[in-house]
Image (cartoon, rainbow, N blue to C red):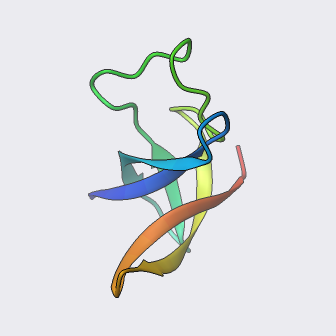
Amino acid sequence: MQTTIYIYLEEDSAYRPTQAIALDNGLYHVLPTPDYDPKDEDWQFVPGSIVRCEERESNGKPFLLAVEKLK
């Protein structure tokens, strides 16, 4: 199942939403955004990575933040 997760952008101190495939135990396979260009954005975890996500909250709304690369 695909879901939206957020990846930290190193150079902007911001977060990028992208799609990911949910795996087991809070793990996700990161997918690229349609306009992904590694020359334009330095993602903390690049597409193809397997990451662990934690639920966070912003303005009262929950979201999934990638916090650790496993593969």
Left or right position of 34 against 5? left
Q: Position of residue 53 (x, y in %)?
A: 56, 66
Q: Eyeballing the image, is 69 above or below 38?
A: below
Residue in the picture at 50% in, 78% down:
55
Left or right position of 30 against 49? left
Q: Where is residue 10 in the image (x, y as percent from the top left)?
A: 67, 38
Identify the image quadrant of the N terminus. bottom left
Total count of labels: 0
**Which of 6 and 20 lies nearest the eye of the viewer?**
6
Q: Residue furthest bottom?
A: 60
**Which of 46 and 42 lies nearest the eye of the viewer?**
42
Identify the image quadrant of the C terminus. top right
Q: Eyeballing the image, is 14 above or below 64?
A: above
Residue in the picture at 32% in, 57% down:
4
Quadrant hosting residue 42: top right
Q: Which residue lies furthest to the top in this view?
A: 39
Q: Where is residue 47 in the image (x, y as percent from the top left)?
A: 51, 32
Q: Eyeballing the image, is 24 above or below 70?
A: below
**Which of 41 and 49 lies nearest the eye of the viewer?**
41
**Which of 58 and 51 lies nearest the eye of the viewer?**
58
Residue in the picture at 31% in, 21% down:
35
Quadrant hosting residue 62: bottom left
Q: Where is residue 27 in the image (x, y as percent from the top left)?
A: 55, 62
Residue in the picture at 33% in, 32% down:
33
